Amino acid sequence: MKILIYTITFLLATSCYAQEKYQATQATQNDNLDIWTSSGMNGGCMFFELPVYYLNKNYVVYQDCTTRKILYADIPTFKMVNHYGEYGLALDKNGVYVKGNFVATDTTGFVFLGNNEKDFLWKTNTSVYKNTTVLSELNANEFTRLSSQKEESYSRIYFKDNQNVYYFDKKIEGADLATADLVYNDNHLFYDKNYMYKDGEIVYFEGEPLLYVNNSLKKTATKVIYNNKIIPTIDAKTLVGLSRHYAKDKNNVYCNTFDRIQTLPINNADFNKIKVFDHTNSAYITDGKNLFYRENMFPKGEFDVATFGTFGFTDFVYDKNGVYTRRYDEKLKKVVYDKFPFKYTDAVSSKNLQITKGSELYVYYKNQAYSKSTNELYDNLTPKQIEITKNRPHTPNNMVRLAKISGKTVLRILFDYKLSKDDNFVYHDDKKTSADAFTFRKLDNNYYIDKDNVYIFDREKGLKAITYIDAETALFFNGFVMDKNYLYLNDTRIIKSDKLEILASYPGYRMGCGLDTQPTSDYYLFRNVEGFWWVKVSDAITIRYFGKTLDTWLSPLFENLEIAKK
C-alpha cells in the first residue's frame, strides 16, 4: 500500500532565470464533461486507489479506495509520518491518524514499526499500538524490529523485546532471541539455532523441523535439503553455513551455482584459512591460496589473494594493487575486471580506502574519489569534501556531489538528475543557468521556485519558467501549485484559488495492455469562491462548473459526500 500526502508549505521565494518560458494555457471548460469513475485499476474503488491526505486551510480530507473522511486536524502541526507516509499514517500535535482514524496520544518518540496486509504497528515513548489499539502487554521501551545479526536489514513483520521474538504482535513461543536472524531476501522467514520459521510458524520437512544453513541449503537432524530434494552426499551433522551461497561440512566446501550444489576444490586442511565475501550480486571465497568467484577459480596472479577485499555492500573489489569493478565483455565473451584510474602511490588497503555511506557513488583512495557512474576522477580533495560527500549521498533536497569547474573540484547540492547548484550558480547538465543560487530551492515534485518565478524541471530540457505564477505567493497544494490568483498544473491555469478547497479525487481511465494508447486520467472535485468545480487531469486539463451548490442528482458519486463546515 502506498500513500500520497500533500502538505501546504509556505516557502521563501527564490530567483532564477531559464532560457525557456511557459506561455499561459487556460484549462478547457466543458459543461458536458462526464462525471464518472473507472473504479480504479483493480475495480471496486469509489475514490483514488491509493490512500491520500489532502490538506485544506481548516481541515484535512482523508480518502482511500472505499473511504473518505473529513478530519478537523491541527493544520499547522499536521504532517505525514517521516518516510512512512505511504502507510496511511500522519501526525499533529494532538495525536496520530491511522488510515484516517484518530488516536489521541502524546506523539513523543513516534516510530512506525511495520505492517502486514491489513494492520500497522507503531509506538510512542509510552505505548505500542496495532492500528488504533494499545497493546498493553508490550513494553514500548523494549519493543522494536527484529534485525539481522549484522544489523544490515530489519523486518517489518518480526519484532523483539528483551526476551522474546514476535510475529507482528504474537509472541513466538520457544524462539531463541540470541540467535534469531533474518533470511536474506525473504521477508516471511527467520531462523534461530533450533528452527526455521515462516509467518511465525516452525517449518518442517518430512515431519522433521528444518534448520537454516544458507539461502540454498537447509537441513534436519539427518538430512540435507536443496530445492526440496535430499542431498545424500553432504554430512548433515557437520554442515554449517558460511554465507548466502557457501557452506561446508567436515569434508568439503559447497557453493550454490543457481541450479545445483557444486563442491569446491578446497582441502579441509585449509578450512581454518577460509574467508568469504558474499553480498550484493557477488560471492567470493578464498582458502588463502586460491580465490573463487562462486564456483570458478581465478587464474593465479589475477588478484593478490592475501590482500583481496570488498566494501561489504557493492560489487567493487580491491587488492593491494588497485580497486576494480566487474563487467561482462561482449567481445571477449567473458567477465573482466576494470581497474579504477586512481593515481596509486601506496598499496591499497582498508586503511586508505573509503566509500560513500550506503552507496557506491564514490570510492575514495587517499585524497582522491572516483565515480563509476560518471567515470570521473576527482583528486586533491580536502578532508571536508570527503567527509561531506561520503555522508550525504542521498539526503533529500540536500544531496551533495563533487563537480569540476575549470579543473578544480567543488561541492554541489544535487536536486535532481542533471540539476544542481553551488554557492554561485545553478546548473543543468553542468551548464550554468541564470538562476539565483542563493535562493533557489525545490517547491515540490518537479516544481522549483525563486523570488521571481516558479519553474518546472525536465531532466532533458532543464528549467522552464512559469512566468504567470506569482512567485511571492506560490505554494504547493495537494499535487498542484497555487498562488494568490489561480490553481495550476504544469503550464495550465485551472480555476481561481480564492477560498480554494480540494474535496475528493476519483480514478479516471486506467491503461490496459501495452498497445493501449488512450491517456490515463484522474478527476478532482474542488470548491472555491465561485462554487464547485469538476476537473479532469489527463494529457490536457478540462473543467466543468457545477454552480454555487453541489447537486447530488448530478452523480451517485455525490449522493453521500460529506462537505466540510465553512
Image (tube, grey):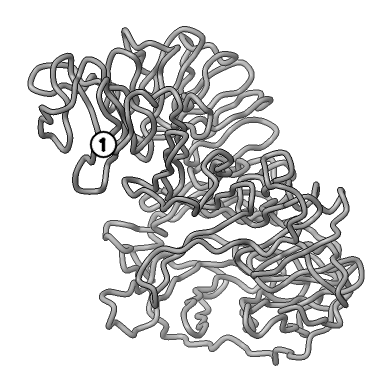
From the top left corner, tell me how far across and down residue 92 is, in percent: 67, 37
Q: Residues within 10 Å of mark 1 (few under 14, many from 20)?
A: many
Give amino acid for label 1: Ser
Quarter assignment of residue 253:
top left
Residue at the disc numbered 1: 216
- Expressed as whole percent of the image width and height from the top left, the position of residue 67 reads 40, 48
Foreground: 468 or 526? 468
Where is 534 relative to 207, above or below? below
Q: Is residue 117 visible?
A: no
Could you say whether the residue bearing mark 1 is in a helix, strand or loop? loop
Query: In the shown orientation, is residue 380 left or right of residue 40?
Result: right
- Residue at image coords 81%, 77%: 470
Above or below, 441 against 434 in this view is above
Write the residue at 70% across / 92% down. 23
Q: Is residue 352 at all visible to an observer of this figure?
A: yes
* Drawn side of residue 482 relative to residue 248, left or right: right
- In-front residue for pair 539/307: 307
Question: In the figure, is residue 90 to the left or right of 496?
Answer: left
**Residue 5 coordinates in the image, percent (x, y):** 57, 53
